[in-house]
Amino acid sequence: MKQIALLLSFFLFNNLYSQANNGSAYDDGFNGFYTRDTSPNNVNADFSALKISGQAITIEAWVMPLFLDAVNESTSFISCGTTDQYLKEWTGYNLLLRRDEQQLNGDVTFKISDCATVQNIGEISAANCLVAGEWVHIAVTFNGTKLKIYINSVLTAESDHNGLIGFRNSINQHVFNIHINNGLIDDVRLWNVERTQPEIAQNINNKLVGNEAGLAAYWPLDDATNNITSDYTASHNDLTAYCKFVKTIPQTSLGTSSIISIDPSEKNFGATELNQYVTVSDFEIQNTGDAPLYGAISNNNEDLYIPPYGTRFFLDPQSIDKISFYIRPLKKGIIHSTIDFVKGNAQNLGISVPFIVEGVRELGIDANNIDMWIHPNGVFAFNYQFHESGLEWPKFSGKHVVYSSGVWVGAKVQDEIHTAVSARSTYIEEFAPGPIEDGQPADPDDPKFRVYKIHINDNSSNPDYAEWPVDLGAPVDNLRRPKHLADQTVFVVYNDLDEINHDHISSTPMGAEIQQTVFAWNESGELGNTVFMRFKLINKSNDYWEDTYFALWSDPDVGSAYDDFVGIDTTRNMGFAYNGSNSDQAYGDGPPAIGYDILKGAYYTKPIQAFAYYDYTLPDEFGEPQSGRECYNYLQGLNRYGNPYHDPVNSIDTVFPLNGDPKTNEGWIDKNQGDRRFLLSTGPFNLYPGQAKEIVAALIVARDSADRSDDYLNSIT
């Protein structure tokens, strides 16, 4: 009788819970949910409700991990903290999911911190409690002295910890995140009190109203409107939701009866630039079974790269959906391969879709001793293929002087700061391929908005010559033929209007379009070690840009990344980077130096107006920018927080820090080797809608031709 009663009780719960719960959220592993204190999704939002401080907290959620193959990789499942100091942990509370290489199932870890300068961090873990394809209810609590983890309302782990939950006072934004490395999430609850085991068990299967005592936030995660899912409490901390909502609810078994059907059965992607992504958006997957279907795609061809974004999927029973992912050819020529549907719960796993793609054209300029990658998103001197340094010198040597470079623009628009920034080292890429057309960003996936490269003797047999984008601003001669500015000429166009690209630092788009032309000569001497760049900055917005700055940004790595110095030579309008000692791991004795020279800036009489440098190993005020405002501070030659750089040698404030002479050891010169970044700025200038400003610059690499074992500083003179 007791077993029958339990079965009836479970059946009754399942029936009632199913009626109350409309579904759950599927996170493919690269999106999730978030809100920020600087940009709430609801005008009535009270973000302070999420910054739970003191001695009491409870977090609850239903979760079903679908893949536990990210060995030793922790996923921050539910967390709240500041974006300050990206290499440090400034998180008040953090619930993490992971699997180590010694086990098949996953762990749950709960961490809290007082976020003081010397942090008091409490941590507890419950091992082997996550199983792929199975629902589990997680609850974690803290009461000032003990951390506890409950799995399916059963106390699974507890640990002593005397401390507080706190949040660091910072001018930077605070972010609340919900994210799982591929799986289902449902019914997330955040409490500012410690919930007891009976309270957790009693309410584990009940939907809440939103006004329960101690409830700080509550997201049922049943649906979203315009990518916003609601917080049911009076705090209104609605979340941005880049997830798919499905009908599967907690305690629903996935089963194994689903059959996967795929259309098309074969694919020809045609030709694409080497190392450029092909967007695949027309693969239709059908779940013909009566149970939910999940799985993943894969490819084992070493000549291709398919990043994990979008490669996993989840479908409700008897449903059809399309998946989008990317393919990137890594070698020239025609590549035959297959897209393989693997893992998951389909009966007919192992389906393969054959396809063809042709990798063509080299991205970059290599007319002389410099071999430099160029991309249609404001990034140059970066190798996306292997995510490594992208300015090789000398060509074919395998040695590099720059990890990445990019374009920065910032202006005041009605007293607000708008920026457009490319800083690949910290994943800030606010530009996208293509122009702005009728106030809208062009489709960045259109192959027309690629990198165009022509050589001095080219004709229409070169597709880039034949399709030279005159209408996009590419240079032409009097007969409107492609204009050869040197032995090699490269052209790209890009814009910053897509707001999604500004999410990383929550900056505001400018409506900037940049037409960039790069050219170089195959010569000996200094010209053979120089690349020229011309930028046409156009205000394609409806706003007046005031106090506009344009800068070349660089993350120089002269050989090794962590032993560099930087400086500014105001007499030559040149920012430069050089090795921190006479010997470099890559270049050996007497390593080279790299210089960025603005030849034509905002004003002919004064091409440059500011220089700034920073490094994630330096104090906060010289650290990585975390907002559009901080980027604009650097553009002006100020530090991250908007204060002047102070010259310790001459006891004055300056917009040209490190302006001394390293060779003579006079003035303010860089000390303590590091992984530096710097900006060379021109401005301020104003641009009305439709107006443009042209900037011309050069990148120069030099190495002392004398005895290299003598003095490496000769490379910068």
Image: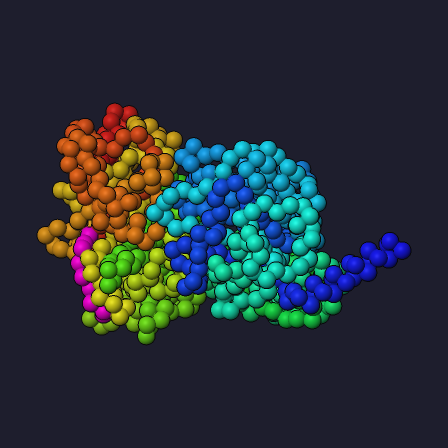
Picture quadrant of residue 66:
bottom right
Q: Which residue is outermost to the bottom?
A: 438
Q: Nearer the viewer, residue 71 or 133?
A: 133
Q: Nearer the viewer, residue 569 or 541?
A: 541
Residue in the picture at 48% in, 69% down: 226
Above or below residue 437? Residue 614 is above
Which quadrant would the C terminus be assigned to in this image? top left
Above or below residue 686? Residue 382 is above
Above or below residue 29? Residue 483 is below
Which region of the structure is painted magenta? 682-691
Helix, strand or loop for the magenta stretch, by majority: strand
> Could you say where residue 77 lies in the image, as x and y percent from the top left?
56, 49
Is residue 690 part of the magenta span, yes or no?
yes
Is 27 displayed left or right of 513 in the figure?
right
> Could you say where residue 668 lies in the image, as x and y percent from the top left?
19, 33
Q: Which residue is outermost to the left?
A: 605
Residue 169 visible in image: yes
Q: Which residue is outermost to the front?
A: 213
Above or below residue 674? Residue 626 is below
Is residue 551 part of the magenta span, yes or no?
no
